Image (cartoon, rainbow, N blue to C red):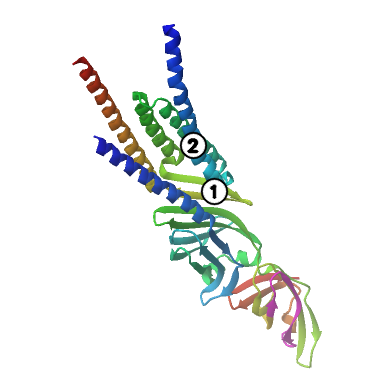
């Protein structure tokens, strides 16, 4: 019986030492884990827009981090699903540094489906989760739910009073004062096409101007379009204007009444 | 006179035993509480878990003292078995069956953290079961020896 007791005692001591060393080094490793998200970048892709969040993980601990999976699910303030994105890193070995980016893409079709997001400020609900395996034995999952304000790129689009001035013997100049605010965190570059319809829904005239509006700034311009004298009578005091914004990221239109 | 002698004898036996138990308790406290606190500040643990840690230290110091106090008796093994069982229950309760869930407030957002420690819990239970098995064998050996001695004295 004595050897059995001794064997059990030795086994118990060895397992306790293993457990204590593992627990202590695991806590030490977590304390020495250096990770941070850098400033988010916004760029256009062939399908739409991409919000890129670069991050790094500096694993100064004693154990590998494997199967790192970052997932973000974005819904609008009404709970309507917008996008789901994931980033997978197979392994962050001990003593190594990994730099990656979590890309959240919103396709042009989704953008046009949620047109109101381009014209009205809102908020998004972001469900973010990070899953990983610590030391190949301990699965860890972190999740958070946060509300992120969304600034519309064409906020408060408004049209001032349209007036027309003589231009030459065949045309007159129609001046359309237009304004909007770019509340988004990306710059707008592209063109804006303007079509004027009279109260009979008949196209009177159209024109195009270039757009270059920085993030968090206002657009306040007078757009000049030309109207032949023969069509001048078609321009009524009330009607609608169709604005078509064409940028590298999306093409969107908006109707605005004028009087 | 006889009563006084037996009292003196009892005290002579008891004082070193109590001193040994107290010393053992103090040593256990140093290794289980003082040294880990030097390495890892308790602030690292969420509030609920710091209380669980104090309870853990309390349990192991208590059993270290009583096991030493009753060493050489059957109670030494009985308390060792009790310690093993209590530690198994303690680990299951504290580790929430192996799935540890915490909610950490960061600025205005609550971060939910789920750590799957089932493998770790299984090893903890296993090591305590080994401890219990060892104590049971020791108790059996102790009783067998006692029976042997009493039978030898009869013959």
Q: Is residue A214 magenta?
A: yes
Q: Which residues are magenta?
A: A211-231
Q: Is residue A54 above or below residue B33?
A: below
Q: Residue A126 placed where, x, y %?
A: 56, 58
Residue at the top extreme? B1
Q: In the figure, is residue B65 to the left or right of B128?
A: right
Quadrant in the picture for the C terminus of chain A:
bottom right
- Residue sitting nearer the eye, A221 or A167: A221
Query: Residue drawn 45% across and 14% down?
Result: B8
Q: Quadrant of residue A224?
A: bottom right
Residue holding disc 1 = B39
Residue A126's place in the image compared with B68, above or below, is below
Relative to A20, say whether A150 is above or below.
Answer: below
Foreground mark, 2 or 1? 2
Question: Where does label 2 land, which residue?
Answer: B27
* Whole-number angstrom distance, CA of label 2 to CA of label 1: 17 Å
Q: Give the residue drawn at x 61%, y 77%.
A: A247
Name which residue lies at 39% across and 49% down. A18
Which residue is located at x 77 percent, y 80 percent? A175
């Amino acid at each position: 019986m004595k050897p059995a007791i001794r064997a059990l005692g030795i086994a118990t001591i060895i397992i306790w030492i293993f457990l204590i060393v593992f627990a202590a080094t695991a806590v030490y490793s977590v304390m020495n884990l250096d990770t941070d998200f850098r400033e988010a970048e916004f760029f256009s892709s062939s399908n739409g827009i991409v919000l890129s969040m670069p991050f790094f993980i500096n694993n100064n601990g004693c154990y590998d981090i494997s199967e790192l999976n970052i997932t973000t699910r974005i819904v609008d303030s009404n709970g309507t699903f917008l996008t789901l994105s994931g980033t997978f890193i197979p392994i962050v070995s001990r003593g190594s540094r990994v730099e990656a980016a979590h890309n959240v893409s919103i396709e042009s079709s989704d953008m046009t489906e949620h047109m109101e997001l381009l014209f009205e400020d809102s908020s998004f609900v972001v469900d973010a989760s990070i899953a990983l395996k610590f030391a190949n034995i301990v699965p860890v999952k972190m999740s958070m739910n946060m509300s992120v304000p969304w600034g519309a790129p064409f906020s408060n689009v408004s049209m001032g009073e349209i007036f027309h001035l003589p231009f030459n013997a065949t045309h007159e100049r129609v001046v359309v004062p237009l304004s909007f605010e770019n509340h988004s965190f990306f710059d707008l570059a592209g063109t804006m096409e303007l079509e004027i319809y009279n109260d009979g829904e008949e196209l009177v005239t159209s024109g195009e101007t270039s757009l270059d509006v920085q993030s968090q700034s206002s657009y306040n311009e007078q757009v000049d379009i030309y109207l032949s004298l023969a069509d001048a009578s078609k321009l009524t005091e009330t009607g609608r204007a169709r604005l078509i914004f064409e940028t590298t990221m999306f093409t969107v239109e908006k109707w605005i009444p004028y009087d | 006179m006889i009563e006084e002698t037996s009292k003196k004898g009892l005290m002579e036996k008891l004082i070193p035993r109590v001193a040994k138990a107290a010393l053992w308790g103090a040593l256990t406290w140093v290794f289980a509480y003082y040294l880990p606190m030097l390495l890892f500040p308790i602030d690292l643990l969420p509030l609920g878990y710091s209380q669980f840690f104090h309870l853990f230290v309390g349990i192991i110091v208590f059993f270290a003292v009583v096991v030493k106090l009753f060493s050489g008796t059957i109670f030494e093994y009985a308390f060792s078995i009790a310690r093993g069982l209590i530690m198994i229950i303690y680990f299951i309760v504290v580790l929430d069956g192996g799935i540890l869930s915490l909610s950490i407030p960061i600025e205005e957002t609550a971060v939910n953290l789920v750590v799957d420690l089932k493998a770790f819990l299984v090893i903890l239970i296993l090591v305590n079961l080994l401890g219990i098995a060892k104590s049971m064998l020791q108790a059996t050996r102790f009783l067998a020896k006692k029976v042997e001695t009493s039978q030898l004295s009869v013959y």
